[in-house]
C-alpha cells in the first residue's frame, strides 16, 4: 500500500513487528523469528527467504514479475505480503475447520490429560493430579513443546524434590525452572492484570503469531465468580476462536483436533463455558 514505508536493516517500529508476524505465518517451514520490532540481520535474511519462496510460487501471478531477493520490504514485497494475508483470510472463510497451530520446528503442543493412568493417581498434596493437576499438566505441555523431556509424572517428581508445592497448588516459577537450560537465565513469568475480553484476545493472539503457547486461567460459567477454576493452554486459532489444549478431558487435544468445539476457548460449553480471567506469560 502507498502509505507504507520501506522496511530495511536498522528500521524499527510497530510495522516491523507486523512484518515479523507475517513472516512467521507465511514462510514454510516457519522461521520462528523474534517479534521485537527491530529489523536486524535475522529479519533481513528471513525477508529474503520469503521473497525467494514467493518467487517460486506466487510473485509473477500477483505482481507480474519476480521480487528482488534483497531483504528489503518495498512496495512490491508489501503487495505480495498483503496478497498472502488476504488469501489466508479467504482460506479460513472457505474452510470452517481451518486452524493455525503453533509449532516449534515440526512439534505441536502435546496434550497431557490429568487423568492419564501414567500419572493421574499421583498426589500433589491431599489431592491427585487427576483432580487438581490442571496447572502442572499445562506447564508440562509448554515445557515439552520446547523440547524438554517432561511429562506430568516427571514434573511432579521435580516439584516434590524442589519444594514446588504449597498444599495442592504449585509454585509456578519452580515448575518452569524444571525446563531451565543449564547455564542460562531462569525462565521469566509475568501476570498481566486484565479485565477486558479484548486485552486477553490481543495478548493471546500476539503470542500465537510468534509461535508461543499461552497459559490461560479460566472461570467456569457454572461458578461465574471471576476466579480461575481451571488452567488450559492456547495452542492455535481458527477464523473465529482460540484453540486450546484442555488437560481435564480426553477430548481436549486441540493441537490434534482443532475443529471440535470442546477445544475452542470461547465457543466451548463445557462447565457452562470458559472465560479467561488470568494469563501466565512465560519466556523460556
Image (cartoon, rainbow, N blue to C red):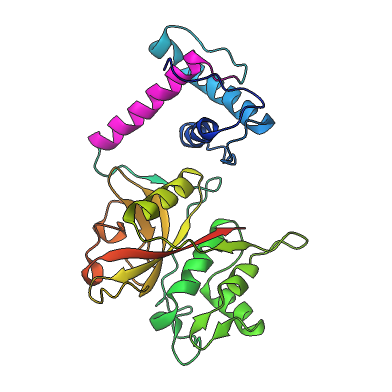
Residue 257 visible (yes or no): no
Above or below 133: residue 60? above
Residue 242 drawn above or below residue 251: above
Q: Would you say 203 lies left or right of 38 here?
A: left
For the C terminus, the image quarter is bottom right
Residue 208 image position (x, y, % from top left): 45, 48
**In this figure, what is the number of numbered marks?**
0
Q: Is residue 146 left or right of residue 268?
A: right
In the image, 89: left or right of 12?
Answer: left
Q: In the figure, residue 183 lies in which quadrant? A: bottom right
Q: Position of residue 204 (x, y in %)?
A: 42, 52
| Residue 137 within the segment the image draws in magenta | no
Image height of 147 relative to 164, above or below: above
Toward the bottom, the furthest residue is 126
Residue at the extreme top: 64
| Magenta region, residue range | 72-94
Q: Nearer the viewer, residue 225 or 95?
A: 225
Relative image position of residue 182 (x, y in whole percent): 75, 63
Residue at x 52%, y 67% (from the top left corner)? 139
Quarter the N terminus occupies: top left
Residue 12 visible somewhere in the drawing: yes
The image shows residue 230, relative to residue 265, as above or below, that is below
Q: Main secondary structure of the magenta part?
A: helix
Residue under the image location 31 percent in, 33 percent down: 89
Residue 104, position as x, y percentages in the image = 54, 48
Q: Is residue 88 magenta?
A: yes
> Residue, x 22% and y 75% (percent of image)?
222
Q: Residue at x 42, y 54 (%)?
A: 235
Q: Residue furthest right?
A: 183
Amino acid at each position: 500500500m502507498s502509505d507504507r514505508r520501506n522496511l530495511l536493516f536498522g528500521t524499527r517500529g510497530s510495522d516491523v513487528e507486523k512484518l515479523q508476524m507475517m513472516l512467521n505465518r507465511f514462510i514454510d517451514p516457519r522461521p520462528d523469528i523474534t517479534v521485537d520490532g527491530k529489523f536486524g540481520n535475522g529479519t533481513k535474511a528471513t525477508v529474503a527467504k520469503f521473497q525467494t519462496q514467493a518467487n517460486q510460487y506466487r510473485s509473477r501471478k500477483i505482481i507480474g514479475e519476480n521480487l528482488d531477493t534483497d531483504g528489503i520490504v518495498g512496495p512490491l514485497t508489501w503487495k505480495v505480503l498483503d496478497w498472502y494475508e488476504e488469501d489466508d483470510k479467504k482460506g479460513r472463510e472457505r474452510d470452517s475447520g481451518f486452524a493455525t497451530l503453533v509449532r516449534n520446528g515440526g512439534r505441536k503442543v502435546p496434550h497431557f490429560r490429568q487423568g492419564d493412568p501414567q500419572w493421574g493417581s499421583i498426589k500433589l498434596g491431599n489431592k491427585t493430579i487427576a483432580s487438581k493437576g490442571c496447572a502442572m499438566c499445562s506447564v508440562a505441555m509448554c515445557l515439552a513443546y520446547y523440547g524438554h523431556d517432561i511429562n506430568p509424572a516427571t514434573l511432579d517428581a521435580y516439584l516434590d524434590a524442589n519444594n514446588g508445592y504449597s498444599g495442592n497448588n504449585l509454585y509456578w516459577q519452580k515448575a518452569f525452572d524444571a525446563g531451565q537450560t543449564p547455564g542460562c537465565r531462569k525462565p521469566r513469568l509475568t501476570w498481566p492484570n486484565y479485565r477486558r475480553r479484548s486485552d486477553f484476545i490481543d495478548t493471546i493472539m500476539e503470542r500465537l503469531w510468534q509461535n508461543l503457547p499461552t497459559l490461560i486461567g479460566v472461570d467456569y460459567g457454572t461458578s461465574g465468580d471471576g476466579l480461575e477454576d481451571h488452567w488450559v493452554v492456547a495452542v492455535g486459532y481458527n477464523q473465529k476462536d482460540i484453540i486450546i489444549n484442555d488437560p481435564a478431558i480426553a477430548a481436549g487435544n486441540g493441537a490434534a483436533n482443532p475443529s471440535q468445539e470442546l477445544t475452542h476457548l470461547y465457543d466451548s460449553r463445557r462447565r457452562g463455558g470458559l472465560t479467561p480471567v488470568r494469563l501466565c506469560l512465560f519466556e523460556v
